Image (tube, rainbow, N blue to C red):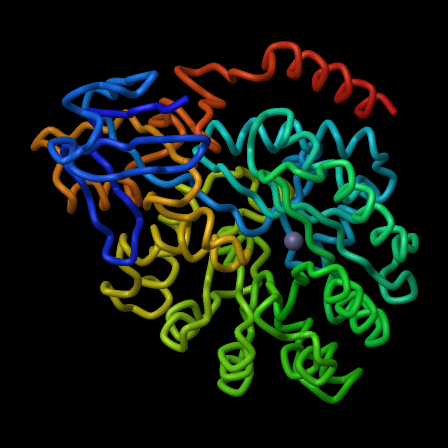
Amino acid sequence: MDTLLRNAFIYTGDAQHRCHTNGALLISQGRLQWVGDEADCPETSDHTAARVVDLGGRVVMPGLVNTHTHGGLSLHRGCCDSGNLFQWAQTLAPHTSPLTLEDNRWGCYQAVLEMVRGGITTACDCTRYGAGLFASVAAEVGMRAFGGAMANSPALRPNGRPNWPLALEETRQAMADHAGDDRVRFYLGAHSPYSCTPELLVEVKQAANQLGLPFVIHAAESREEVEMVQSRYGRRPIEHLHHLGVLDARTLLAHCVWLDEGEMALLADTGAAVSHNPISNAKLASGVAPVMALRARGVPVGLGTDSMLSNNALNLFQEMKFAVLLQRAHHLDGHALSAGDVLAMGTREGAQALGWQDEIGSLEAGKEADLVVLDIDHPLGLTPERVLSDLVFAAGPQHVQAVMVHGEMIFEAGRFTRVDEAQIKAGLREHGLSLSNA
Ligand SMILES: [Zn+2]
């Protein structure tokens, strides 16, 4: 069934940041068939589309892409809000180590509902166990998922039980369970250069190659990590990963805060992508990632919220704004990152980081109809400059009126269309109560 969305202010998110101030989008079989000025729309005059929706001049933008999160950890939001990365991880371990698959599943509900409400249509989720859980919850709600698990070596990660090759088996099973569902993709991951042996890193990357899957890892998150990896292996984290042969165009690295010039060149040369998590990096006192230097070298940089334990909101509007503020405050440069730069990171570049850029990340004919409708008005009227500025510096989930994935409204006027939010919340409360009394 064809759908025509008309009377919209469209921010396409294409490479030129094109806007259509009085725009229309024609959607057929979940994809954008046509995007442009309403006056030029082939379907406007004769209204042959089966469904015509008047958006009343609202703003439409591409669905936001969260390139790094851990949905399964959402139940313990706020249980530890202090300490740098390693201190924090140690304080958290008694809470997160005993988590069951059922806890993980409820955490994913919490995460998915919050993300969709905030205009996030795709998320890369990382877990230790239950590689398919996030994708199955996301699929139920209608959101797009890039799911998978990160292997770790128990000897290098206290409190860790072995999860490899279990993660491989779980991922294969999840791929079979979601076969034919274009909204779901998977990767194979390893936790980090410091919690995985070199042998494990190579084994996971080779398995990913065999299955034709991307490889995801945390890397160069804190200065302590750099020192630890350097003293163990004689190389900095990115050099170490390159030496092991795990960096290529199908590798996504979360954080990358501590990089030297040589490591940035390695990322650019191999085509690897970075997930920038500015709020998590600041909260855990990890530092400020060299985002502008990476982008100047052509490294795709997406944005990530990280988990509800290190953020604690899964809100990419906050992430976009904070990414700009952090770079400007850090470099004492009021021109560091523009609204357009960071919108690209939250959409098109994020899609590129996941290797999904042919299908999602901008509103262009041929791509998936993943979009957000926002109730934004401006006292002086909407212009492209004001809309770009508002999307980054003034907007939030409170402005999200509707969210569409694959041409289907999955959230509209405060309601999820596929699931009963009240019922899920009641389940979450009940499950949370059983946890807090355990
Ligand atoms: Zn992470």
Left or right of 369 on screen, residue 425: right
Residue displayed at 83% across by 70% down: 203
Quarter of the picture containing the C terminus is: top right
Q: Nearer the viewer, residue 438 or 273?
A: 273
Q: Nearer the viewer, residue 11 or 217?
A: 11
Left or right of 295 on screen, residue 74: right
Left or right of 393 on screen, residue 397: right
Residue 216 pos. (x, y %): 66, 60
Q: How many marks?
A: 0
Quarter of the picture containing the N terminus is: top left
Q: Nearer the viewer, residue 228 or 41?
A: 41
Residue 69 pos. (x, y %): 61, 46
As drawn, which residue projects farthest toward the left? Answer: 380
Residue 394 pos. (x, y %): 28, 38
Residue 283 pos. (x, y %): 55, 52
For residue 29, above or below residue 366? above
- Res 346 visible: yes
Residue displayed at 49% across by 23% down: 410
Give residue 32's quadrant in the image.
Answer: top left
Residue displayed at 73% across by 27% down: 106
Residue displayed at 34% across by 62% down: 329
- Res 81 visible: no
For residue 133, above or below residue 286? above
Give residue 97's quadrant in the image.
Answer: top right
